[in-house]
Amino acid sequence: MNWYKKNTIAQQQTGVPGVLYHATYRPYLQSIIEKGLVPNFSQTWDISQEGAVYLDISPNAAESYAETADGPAISQEYIDDIIILAIDTNHLDKNLLSHDSNINFDSSGEGVTSFEYWGTIPSSAIINFENISRGGRGI
């Protein structure tokens, strides 16, 4: 367990939306379908916590995180080919879900929009995706 990890959603008794969103890049889609969303597969932010997959309640916010990525592995070609994955939270272990430790929220958890998932998100939890650059949809 990471010392910096906040209390999990299950410990906080805070509700979780039925769907959360994760933005990534089309070149990673086949690997995600085969292996799931693996933490730190391609770290897009220097402040990203090792071992976490980041999710948001808003597909637009998730997209903005991918658009402004500052990690060394992200090229402009990838920025131009963002996809948004819709994640069914019923397929997630709530004990591995916590509020995003990079964002300060009050202790009640009110207003939380961004989350960290401390494990691999199985591909079975991905219920849809939207290709931002081409406007396509599907899984």
Image (cartoon, helix red, strand yellow):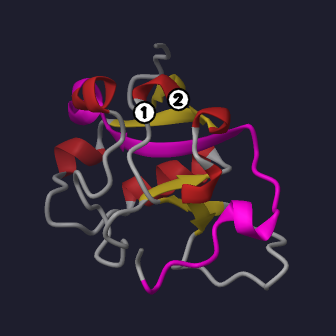
Q: Pointer 2: what residue? A: 125
Q: Is residue 28 toward the left or the right of residue 130 in the image?
A: left
Q: Which residue appears at 36% of the width and 43% of the height?
A: 24
**Which numbered dot is residue 96?**
none
Instruction: Work out whether residue 116 or residue 103 is closer to the camera in this orientation and state it.
Output: 116
Q: Which residue appears at 57% of the width and 43% of the height?
A: 21
> Is 14 located above or below residue 93 in the figure?
below
Q: CA distance from mark 1 to mark 2?
A: 6 Å
> Is 73 located above or below residue 86 in the figure?
below
Q: Residues within 10 Å of mark 1 (few under 14, many from 20)?
A: some
Q: Give the residue type that dot 2 points to.
A: Ala
Q: Is 85 part of what is drawn in magenta?
A: no
Q: Position of residue 96 (x, y in %)?
A: 54, 57
Q: Secondary structure at mark 2?
A: helix
Instruction: Work out whether residue 118 or residue 138 is closer to the camera in this orientation and state it.
Output: 118
Q: Is residue 27 toward the left or the right of residue 1 in the image?
A: left
Residue 132 picture quarter: top left
**Circles 1 and 2 in contact, beta carbons < 8 Å:** yes
Q: Is residue 126 toward the left or the right of residue 77 in the image?
A: right
Q: Give the residue type that dot 1 points to.
A: Pro
Instruction: Work out whether residue 29 or residue 101 is closer to the camera in this orientation and state it.
Output: 101
Q: Pointer 1: what residue? A: 122
Q: Residues within 10 Å of mark 2 (few under 14, many from 20)?
A: some
Segment tinted magenta in the rendering? 3-30
Q: Secondary structure at mark 1?
A: loop
Q: Position of residue 121 (x, y in %)?
A: 44, 41
